[in-house]
Amino acid sequence: MKIDILTLFPDMFEGVLNESILARAQATSKVTITTHNIRDYSKDPHKKVDDYGFGGGAGMVLMPEPIYDAIQDVKTPDSKVILLTPQGVPYKQEHAYRLAKETHLIFVCGHYEGFDERIRSFVDEEISMGDYVLTGGEVPCMAIVDSIVRLLPGVIEEQSHREDSFNNHLLDYPVYTKPVDFRGMKVPDVLLSGHHENIKKWREEEQLKKTKERRPDLLESR
């Protein structure tokens, strides 16, 4: 997979992209991730990419031309262009699985007051991280890229992500490690029993129990 990230602040991605699973996935050629500074596509001598919005209002608005040119520069016939915006569709695990099947993803990270509305005609999809507003699209982009890359073949064991929270609209089951007894809190006996069928049944019951307690809304989607 190839991922191109269009942003005004490429340095924000340095730590995230060069650590842990994302770093290993790139080192083993499972994914190629490149950041591009939108300012590099500005025709303004001062590399200006925003201006005041017509009709007034607070904040600066990103101009369409630099973003259009940036998209065209990295776009291929296999590209899917994604705009990160609070007005997009709320991101969920099923989106991660779908996007992980793409060949080339282009993420457009906004900043300031927002995008010139015409930028929406350049993209294939709009995604939101939730019903709240952040300074820009960089942080959501980091989260989405991480959620996608870990699903690519060979990045982590398939069983690890198949048993994640939100698969089958359930939260993950509880997990434990050593010590068996920590300050009076003990690992459930069934996990120490070695009886795989009983363990499987216990985990399924715990998934349902935890989801009912913490996220009953997920059960409505089953």
Image (spheres, rainbow, N blue to C red):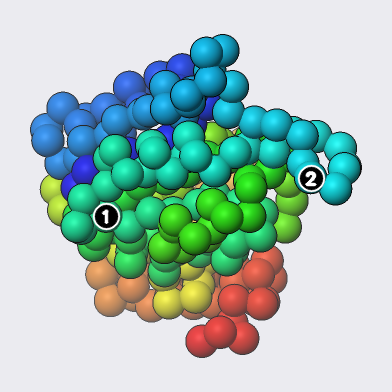
Q: Which mark is residue 79?
A: 1
156 relative position to 184: left or right: left
Q: Position of residue 123 (x, y in %)?
A: 44, 57
In the rendered view, tell whether residue 217 sits above or below residue 176. Answer: below
> How would you rate the neighbour count of disc 1 (Cα within 10 Å): few for under 14, some for 14-19, many for 20 or more?
some
The local secondary structure at tag 1 comes to strand
**Residue 84 at x, y percent in the picture:** 54, 49
Q: Which mark is residue 54?
A: 2
| Residue type of the residue flagged with mark 2 | Phe
- Residue 10 visible (yes or no): yes
| 99 left or right, relative to 207 | left
Residue at horizontal 29%, vertical 38%?
73
Q: Is residue 12 visible?
A: no
Callout 1 amino acid: Ser
Residue 157: give x, y in percent of width and height: 20, 51
Along the line of sight, which residue is nearer the eye, 29 or 60?
60
Q: Which residue corresponds to the image point at 48% horizontal and 35% vertical from the top-left?
A: 66
